[in-house]
Image (cartoon, rainbow, N blue to C red):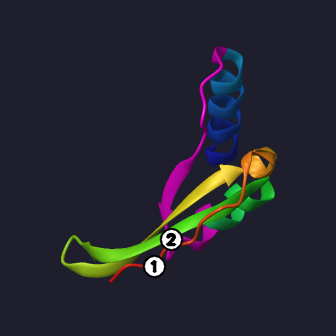
């Protein structure tokens, strides 16, 4: 179901011309990260900070096609 939702959201966003296209997840959500990567998304940013009383890392993913728009940045903040 998750794969279908992401695929549909990407198609809708492209159809409407929305840019940039990206999503956020937590580094500890391994199944979600794998799914995004198999759908062609690349990790472009990582930010570690206190969320819900725990030190967690949020990761930003963008479709691989956005590689032509310039280099990605990876940030790690404590």
Counting from the top left corner in percent of width and height, residue 78 is at 32, 83
Residue 31 drawn in magenta: yes
Number of numbered discs: 2
Is mark 2 in CB contact (under 8 Å) with mark 1? yes
The kind of secondary structure element at disc 2 is strand
- Residue 60 falls in which quadrant of the image? bottom right
Q: Is residue 25 left or right of residue 72?
A: left
The kind of secondary structure element at disc 1 is loop
Q: Earlier in the sequence, mark 2 or mark 1?
A: 2
Q: Where are the magenta residues, as a range?
A: 16-32
Q: Residue at x 70, y 66 (%)?
A: 34
Marker disc for residue 46: 2
Label 2 and label 1: CA atoms lie apart by 6 Å
Camera-side residue: 20 or 33? 20
- Residue 18 falls in which quadrant of the image? top right
Counting from the top left corner in percent of width and height, residue 2 is at 62, 46
- Residue 13 falls in which quadrant of the image? top right
Q: Disc 1 designates what residue?
A: 76
Residue 59 drawn in magenta: no
Q: Residue at x 74, y 45 (%)?
A: 69
Few, some or many residues within 10 Å of mark 2 (<14, 14–19, 20+): some
């Amino acid at each position: 179901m998750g794969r279908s939702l992401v695929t549909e959201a990407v198609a809708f966003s492209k159809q409407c011309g929305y840019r940039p296209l990206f999503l956020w997840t937590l580094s500890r959500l391994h199944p979600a990260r794998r799914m995004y990567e198999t759908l062609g998304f690349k990790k472009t940013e990582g930010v570690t900070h206190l969320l819900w009383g725990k030190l967690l890392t949020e990761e930003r993913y963008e479709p691989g096609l956005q590689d032509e728009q310039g280099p990605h940045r990876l940030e790690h903040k404590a």
